[in-house]
Amino acid sequence: MGIGAEEKKPLLVQLNGQYYDIADFAPKHPGGTKVLNRLAGEEIGEFMRGEKRIMGVRHEHSEAAYNMLERYNVNTIQKGDPLIESKSGMLFKVGSLGSEYWHWIHQPYDGTLRLFDSDILESMTRTSWWVVPAVWIPIVVVFSVISVFSFSSSTDVYNSVLLWSAWFVIGVLTWTLTEYSLHRWVFHWKPSPKSPNQILLHFLAHGLHHKTPMDGDRLVFPPVPAALIVGFFYVIYSNTFQWPVFCAFGAGKLFGYVMYDMVHYYLHHGSPRPRSNLHFRKVYHHNHHFKNFDVGFGISTSLWDYVFHTLGMGPL
């Protein structure tokens, strides 16, 4: 599908904790579109006050400029949006957005959306971060122990631990590729604007996260649907590998998934030390959401972004 009006991308900047979508203003900016593109996703207060240079230029903006900026405040734009302000379930209404859907999900809403009318169903869409390690880490430990004991039937304990370690690490690395592949080719698959069902499917898979990136109860994957996916791969891997290899590999891949969910949650809600690796990852992922959602697909690692040439941006 070619680039057209229906595929217009937001151009988000931040000022004093508020997001502004200045995509429509960018072609009219006196300093040029390139300047604003460079600042996408960034806090622009210091630049507007003339305290920092951008592309070699420092300019103190007038009160009129601030007033003009307010026209593009995302909160103002979203006032009156029936899907956001609805007190009833909005999930099955999202397909009605049609060609507006892609732009709509990339204008972030700092809040939560009610998906279902039923309080029971609504509660099942929410998962606290600690539930993920509480459910899956014991299984990782059990399968790791089984693997070591199974290997030890044909070799000594030292070599059994080495074999478990090797296959565990391979499992973790396999997860990082799975994570990247899902994020890039499944979660960022673009649904047809003419298909409400495709829009609904994408919204459930990932669109909701981009629309409400700070909704802490919808950042990690609920264990019940996760169990179905784990069961699917259990059948495949247990019939592909020898039992001790499967236990080590499966434990490693499951551990990789748990670490991904924990890192992802921390990148949205944690406060890492400046210039630390986690701070870089936080900014890297922030830029995926607010600067350019077509790059920076790696969450727990940038390895596959390097391999597939989709490297995003860290801190300026």
Image: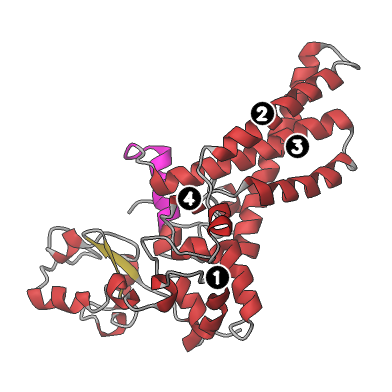
Q: Can the viewer see residue 289? A: yes
Q: Is residue 195 above or below residue 163?
A: below
**Disc 1 and disc 4 in contact, CB within 8 angstroms:** no
Residue at image mark 3: 250
Residue at image mark 1: 91
Q: Amino acid at mark 2?
A: Pro
Instruction: Give the percent coordinates (x, y) of residue 58.
Output: 15, 65
Work out whether mark 1 precedes mark 4 in sequence or the reverse, and give the earlier one. 1
Q: Determine the image quadrant of residue 172.
A: top right
Disc 1/disc 3 C-alpha distance (Å): 34 Å
Can you tell which of label 1 and label 3 is closer to the viewer?
Answer: 1
Residue at image mark 4: 217
> Is disc 4 placed on a helix, strand or loop?
helix
**Disc 1 and disc 3 in contact, CB within 8 angstroms:** no
Q: Determine the image quadrant of residue 92.
A: bottom right
Q: In the image, 256: left or right of 297?
A: right
**Disc 2 and disc 1 in contact, CB within 8 angstroms:** no
